Image (cartoon, rainbow, N blue to C red):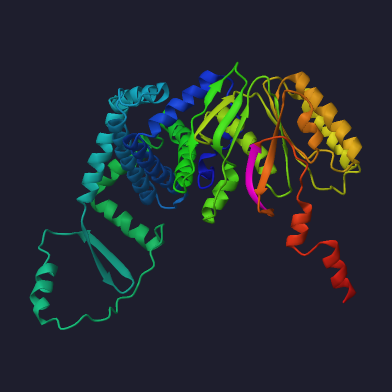
């Protein structure tokens, strides 16, 4: 979501979940306003122009020649004035419905009417017109350039072309030399500009004074808006990209007291974004975790979508806490204070602890910090120990989670955990009934059946015991 928007440094916004349902609804209102085609078009146009303005001001600082520096600042100011006026015209105080954009529109309207902005706009327009009227003639003799005012005279170029047009028989290949244009003036161009400035001292003195008076003309509140609105646009851009492939994102119902979590036709956002680029189908799933239910235990065959399902719930909860759209057609999410995850880590040769100890230490730290408003996502914990020990340890962990009364999603190969308590919900990854080696990536609420379908996979890839021994005997 931040890709292509690195200049705005949006990451802090994505790393800061909101503290209250009211703050979430505040952002929801902004997203609804930005779904208005006229408003979002004006905001996007403003963002494009402001990128040009920032680029111009940055270049002006790097240029070596004063005349080019001043002209670049003037061009940036002209673009800024046009962008601000266009945005103010689109965002009238009564047009947006959100508190945020209404307040911004009112501030913007006052700024456009202020003496500061009116003076900037008038001065930029007057100087631009006077400079546009500057004309000069260059006379090259050897390595010397003579610059003089250009007397009023007619341009006969069009008449010449029209006169000889009747004699044209065919298009001829151009022999003109392509001249490379550089962003910054070279020393010859700068010297010519200085000579022209001597011919038109009043116009160029006004340009120099404009740079002195308006070196920093961008208002702080507009810079803040230009950055912060990108946070919302990044979410809407993701929604548009996914909607083109039939995937829906929605504004979830948010509660600070009702700690139920559910969603319809939800999906893993990160995976979906990749699959959409590859034009591959995305499988959606529903889930419900309503009182007194607190834990989803997800079992089923390997490579059946269990981890993706758990990750989806974590993403949905986290995005909801940011006040953004979430994957699915409908969703209800408690406002979580933290989202804790425990996924298997690769071995670290510098870490002398074993896999079991690492699992225990990490889950201990999570249970110490989690509260009743937290979500814990656990993916196949205690896989490095014996089956009986894994069941014992996992049971103890889930009992601690139940005591905390927080929401939890557990991906496991231990079917026994699915029947641990009435607050535990069993969900199972599905396979094609007629071909158990093929996964559907659907995860449905049902009793854990203990089927890993390992034999079906082994048969599919020729890895059954008779097939392997037969090959070895050849």
Vertical placement of residue 193 versus 257, above or below? below
**Total labels drawn:** 0
Q: Position of residue 89 (x, y in %)?
A: 27, 32
Residue ID at (8%, 75%)? 163
The kind of secondary structure the magenta stretch mainly shows is strand
Foreground residue among 468 and 345: 468
Look at 27% across and 55% down and name the residue there: 196
Left/right placement of residue 117 relative to residue 319 reads left
Q: Quadrant of residue 112?
A: top left
The residue at the point 27 percent across, 81 percent down is 173
Q: Is residue 455 visible?
A: yes
Over which residues does the magenta segment extend?
438-444
Considering only vertical position in the picture, is 125 above or below 116? below
Does 212 sit left or right of 426 as displayed? left
Horizontal relation, residue 306 to residue 275: left or right: right
Residue 305 in view here? no
- Residue 469 placement: quadrant: bottom right
Q: Is residue 71 magenta?
A: no
């Amino acid at each position: 979501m931040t890709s292509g928007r690195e200049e705005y440094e949006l990451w802090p916004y994505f790393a800061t979940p909101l503290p209250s349902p009211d703050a979430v609804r505040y952002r929801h209102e902004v997203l609804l306003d930005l779904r208005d085609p006229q408003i979002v078009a004006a905001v996007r146009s403003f963002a494009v122009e402001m990128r040009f303005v920032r680029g111009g001001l940055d270049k002006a600082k790097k240029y070596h020649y004063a005349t080019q520096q001043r002209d670049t600042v003037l061009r940036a100011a002209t673009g800024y004035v046009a962008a601000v006026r266009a945005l103010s015209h689109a965002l009238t105080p009564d047009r947006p419905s959100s508190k945020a954009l209404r307040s911004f529109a009112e501030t913007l309207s006052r700024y456009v009417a202020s003496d500061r902005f009116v003076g900037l706009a008038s001065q930029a327009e007057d100087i631009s017109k006077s400079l546009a009227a500057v004309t000069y003639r260059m006379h090259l003799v050897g390595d010397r350039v003579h610059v003089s005012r250009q007397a009023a005279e007619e341009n006969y170029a069009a008449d010449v072309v029209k006169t000889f047009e009747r004699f044209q028989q065919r298009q001829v290949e151009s022999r003109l030399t392509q001249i490379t244009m550089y962003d910054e003036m070279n020393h010859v161009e700068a010297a010519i500009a200085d000579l022209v400035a001597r011919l038109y001292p009043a116009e160029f003195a006004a340009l120099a004074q404009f740079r002195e008076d308006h070196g920093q003309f961008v208002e702080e509140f507009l810079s803040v808006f230009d950055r912060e609105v990108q946070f919302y646009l990044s979410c809407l851009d993701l929604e548009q990209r996914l909607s083109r492939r039939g995937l829906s994102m929605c504004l979830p119902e948010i509660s600070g007291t009702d700690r139920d979590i559910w969603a319809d036709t939800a999906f893993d956002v990160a995976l979906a974004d990749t699959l959409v680029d590859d034009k591959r189908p995305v499988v959606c799933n529903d889930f419900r975790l309503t009182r007194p239910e607190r834990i989803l235990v997800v079992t089923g065959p390997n490579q059946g979508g269990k981890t993706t399902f758990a990750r989806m719930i974590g993403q949905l909860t986290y995005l909801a806490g940011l006040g953004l759209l979430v994957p699915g057609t409908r969703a209800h999410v408690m406002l979580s204070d933290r989202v804790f995850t425990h996924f298997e880590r690769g071995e670290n040769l510098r870490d002398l602890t074993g896999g079991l100890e690492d699992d225990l230490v990490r889950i201990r730290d999570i249970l110490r910090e989690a509260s009743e408003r937290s979500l814990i996502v656990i993916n196949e914990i205690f896989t490095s120990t014996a089956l009986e020990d894994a069941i014992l340890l996992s049971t103890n962990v889930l009992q601690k989670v139940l005591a905390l009364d927080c929401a939890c999603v557990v991906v496991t190969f231990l079917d026994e955990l699915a029947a641990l308590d009435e607050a535990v919900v069993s969900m199972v990854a599905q396979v094609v009934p007629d071909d158990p080696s093929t996964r559907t990536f659907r995860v449905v609420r049902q009793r854990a059946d203990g089927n890993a379908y390992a034999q079906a996979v082994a048969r599919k890839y020729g890895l059954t015991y008779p097939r392997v021994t037969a090959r070895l005997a050849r």
